[in-house]
Amino acid sequence: MAEIDVIVRDTIFKYLVPICILVSLCVVYIGELSKAIRDRLFGKRLKKFTELYYKRLEDVRKALFDDLNVLESKVVDLKNRGLIRILEIGVGEGTNLSYYPQQSRLVVVDPRPHFVQYFFENKEKFRDIVLEKFVHSGAEHMRKIQSDSVDVVVTTLVQCCVEDADAVLQEILRVLVKGGRYYYLEHVMDHPDTKRYRQQKWLTKLGIWPWIFDGCHLDREFDVQVAKAGFSEVDQKRFFINTAGSRILDIIQPHIVGVAVK
Ligand SMILES: C[S@@+](CC[C@H](N)C(=O)[O-])C[C@H]1O[C@@H](n2cnc3c(N)ncnc32)[C@H](O)[C@@H]1O
């Protein structure tokens, strides 16, 4: 080996590798520390807030999933057995399981480990739903899920958290069987001429909202993205929830609820 190669190799091993390891450890440590500080500061209040928020959305969720019980599968072997396959993206604790038909085949995708335990605890209450697969990855690349294999895809309050909602939509279109349905309930950015729009923009740009609310973005225009994604039909509406005087809830408006058909 030439002398210069030896010098470069030795320098890399002596300095560069330890520095890279140290920097990575610092990044992980700072990330964990930041989460610990956030949980210490807001943990209990966030839990209460989430409960209130979810209560306000209960009727909308119920109405959204109302027709799941009468849906016929377009996947041949499931249709013959009177079953449907549902893929829930960003399943979290499994808040939507109570709306799924008995015996449905369920596939879930969620990259974050901290919900897993709560999901499985909740799943115990719905033993008749068959969990086929739990994929621990972002929905931008759902390689472990076959194309044209799913009747229903669900996201509720997820598209504000993903890194690339357009990529997720293309993956949804890929995995849905032809005629399959995508059910969604999300919050989106308000109109540009409102005070709320400015709050949403700056709270997100400065990273304050994503830090407190676990990566949530207030500045998404998901309704526009779904409309452009390439579904054959999109039926969606904007709505405002009753905020019960909560100024925080008031910032997460408006919402959209819809069904898009492949
Ligand atoms: C606000 S929680 C909503 C949980 C659940 N859908 C509900 O309605 O209760 C957002 C969820 O999205 C998940 N998530 C974040 N980024 C994601 C991604 N790239 N792909 C799939 N899920 C993601 C989070 O781990 C979390 O479970």
Image (tube, helix red, strand yellow):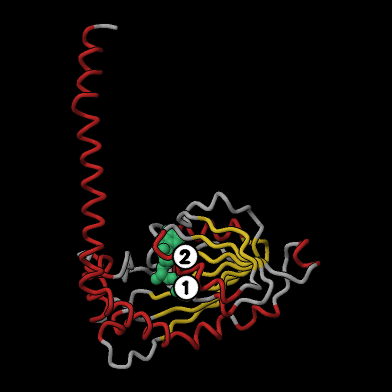
Q: Disc 1 versus disc 2: distance between alpha carbons? A: 8 Å
Q: Earlier in the sequence, mark 1 or mark 2?
A: 2
In the displayed structure, 206 sits above or below 97; it is above
Front residue of this view, candidates 149 and 28:
28
Callout 2 amino acid: Gly
Callout 1 amino acid: Thr
Q: Quarter for ligand 1?
A: bottom left
Measuring from the top left, give residue 227's x and y in whole percent.
50, 69
Measuring from the top left, give residue 57's x and y in whole percent.
44, 85
Q: Would you name the residue on which mark 1 appears?
A: 156
Mark 2: secondary structure: loop
Q: Would you name the residue on which mark 2 appears?
A: 90
Instruction: Name which residue lies at 22% across and 18% down.
Output: 10
Find out if the beta carbon at label 2 lies less than 8 Å from the nearest ligand 1 atom: yes
Q: In which quarter of the image is the N terminus?
A: top left
The number of discs equals 2
In the displayed structure, 106 sits above or below 139; it is below
